[in-house]
Image (cartoon, rainbow, N blue to C red):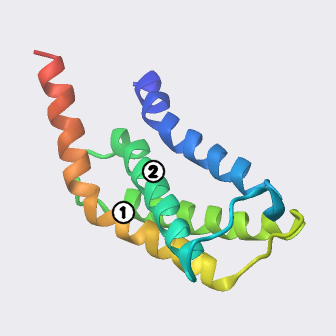
Amino acid sequence: MKKLRVFFALPAIAVACGIFVVSSIPQASLPPLQFDFMDKIIHFFVFFTFGISLIIAFYPQTKNTLQAKPILFIIVIGLLYSAFDEFHQLFVPGRSCEFFDWVADSVGIFASLIFRNPIWNMIKSKISTENL
């Protein structure tokens, strides 16, 4: 079971590392944004993806898809990592720590939770069909 937990955690670890790496790139090295608020849309989708990966990571700890504890962990981890990402950008040339970036990140995490049950059901059915 421990190997299964590590396997399910790998996407979340990969996405978190990707976020950190991209957040470490100085602003001057990034392509220009095409329109206003494009950065908020990017923040939303990146943290939506992170939220989905956290949902996958917490699947092995759930016996019932309606349990509140894994959902709370997903929210807390997502919001804290988002805050850490914004703080980290204070130390990257040309980057800044913006409250509304954190809001866009947070909305992405919460939006991913809409797909929590379908994702867990898909994983459950995939595991059960492979065990037949």
Secondary structure under the numbered disc 1 in the rendered image: helix
Q: Amino acid at mark 2?
A: Leu
Query: 80 or 61: which is nearer to us?
Result: 80
Check disc 2: other Cα within 10 Å, few if <14, some if 14-19, many if 20+.
many
Q: Amino acid at mark 1?
A: Ser
Image quarter where the C terminus lies is top left
Between label 1 and label 2, give the one nearer the viewer. 1
Query: 104 or 119: which is nearer to us?
Result: 104
- Which residue occupies 58% across, 41% down? 13
- Which residue occupies 46% across, 22% down? 3
Indicate the quadrant where residue 66 lies.
bottom left
Mark number displayed over residue 23: none
- Side of 127 where 21 appears, left or right: right
Q: Residue 126: where, in percent of width, then height? A: 19, 30
Q: Distance between the Cα atoms at labels 1 and 2?
A: 9 Å
Q: Residue 42: where, in percent of width, then height? A: 53, 66
Mark number displayed over residue 54: 2
Q: Residue 120: where, in percent of width, then height? A: 25, 46
**Is residue 64 among the parts visible in the rendering?**
no
Residue that badge 1 annotates: 112
- 97 lies above or below 119: below
- Which residue occupies 63% across, 61% down? 81
| Label pair 1/2, CB-CB below 8 angstroms | yes
Q: Residue 98: where, in percent of width, then height? A: 71, 81
- Side of 100 where 9 appears, left or right: left
Q: Which residue reaches farthest top?
A: 132
- Which residue occupies 48% across, 39% down? 11
- Side of 34 where 60 appears, left or right: left
